[in-house]
Amino acid sequence: MRVGIVIEHVDPTHGGAEGWTCRFMEYLHRQGCEVHAVAQEISPDGRRLPIVPHRLGRPASLSRRAEAAAEILDALDLDVVHDMGVGYRADFLQPHGGCWTALVEQKRRLAPPWLGALKRRFDPWLPRHRAHELLLRRQCAADQLTLLALSEKIAGEFQRAGFPAERIRVVYNGVDLRRFSPTGREPFRAATRRRLGLGEETVLALMVAHNLRLKGADSLLGALRRLLPRRLPLHVLVVGGRRLRPWRRRARAWGLEGQVTFLESQAKILPLYAAADLLVHPSFYDSCSLVLLEAAACGLPVIATRQNGAAELFTSPDEGLILDDAADVEGLAESLQRLVADAELRRRLGRAARQRMLSHSQQRNFDQIFALYRQRLAYRRAA
């Protein structure tokens, strides 16, 4: 089978959508597929993958990028094309970042009220906004395109944006259960905690994100501020983000300097899961967070929100603490206090989270999508 994968960047050293896509391309190669990667940028590590690379370069606009991808794909005579959100000339569309219109609206809600009102009024006139709207309309109108939604949440958002429900399939993310496991993280725990200057008596809560505001860092700092008088043996490690100085300044201003540490993105995430006692991910928007699934697979208890599609997998309150509202600072503070105060609760939730992830392995995730490939190819040949 000749498969085309369309994505903005190919770099196996990154996490999120890029890391998932690179692992999926390796899986396709093991299935005997000839994998063609169409991307704006392909890193040196990406070129070492078992792929045939096709570089888009840097088109001047989103529309031109989609057209450039279509031109390359038209010349390749592929059996199946799988697009991660770049264009519309594909069999399957799987935007890991979610639905653009819903994401933009959530960002407006996070802005100060006056700024959110301005954005709602003037955003539709901005060229980039209009280009995103045009791309989404083309995706909704492409009859051959099946949307692989990472959660029911994302499926609903695309339906409201105009994508036909009959062309949507929900396929949740999966996690590498061998790499991310309680036994896999244990060897890293002591050394990582020593580097962080933490004793075993301190409960470490981990947050991993790139867009800290969107992923709820404001709510987390607010919760820590409420907990400060209680003098809990709690330390929070926030990993990721591009501009950490304003967050560090706020932590100092709120008296949290000794209770929260900010680190830039880390290439190796498993040692951080090893050092942590729980994951806190109070996100305002996530399609199906791989961080949440990885931490759960490692046996960490998780605090998450309904605004994260991955929370749909935790069907019982015994599997994770799920907040209805990412802005519920008081609820987040109470959830943190419960887990800090009760080591047995942490162990019980961690075991249940790991058990839940056994049904959502990376292998199962990849197999589901490959089965859809085969169905599409069989239907096309029969027609």
Image: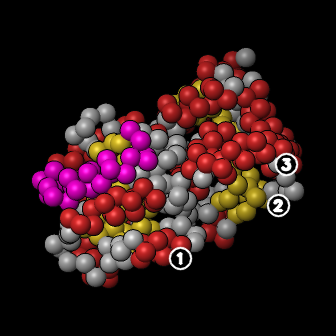
Q: Name the residue under label 2.
A: 58
The residue at the point 17 percent across, 73 percent down is: 200
Give the left or right position of residue 362, taking residue 30 as reference: left
Res 183 seen here: no
Magenta segment's dominant SS is helix
The residue at the point 48 percent across, 76 percent down is: 249
Which quadrant of the figure contains the C terminus? top right
- How far is the residue under mark 1 from the one under mark 3? 31 Å
Along the polypeptide, which appears first: circle 1 or circle 3?
3
- How far is the residue under mark 2 from the one under mark 1? 31 Å
Amino acid at the residue labelled 2: Arg
Q: Mark 1 points at which residue?
A: 245
Callout 1: 10 Å neighbours few (<14), some, many (20+)? few
Amino acid at the residue labelled 1: Arg
- Is label 1 or label 3 in front? 1
Q: Mark 3 points at which residue?
A: 127
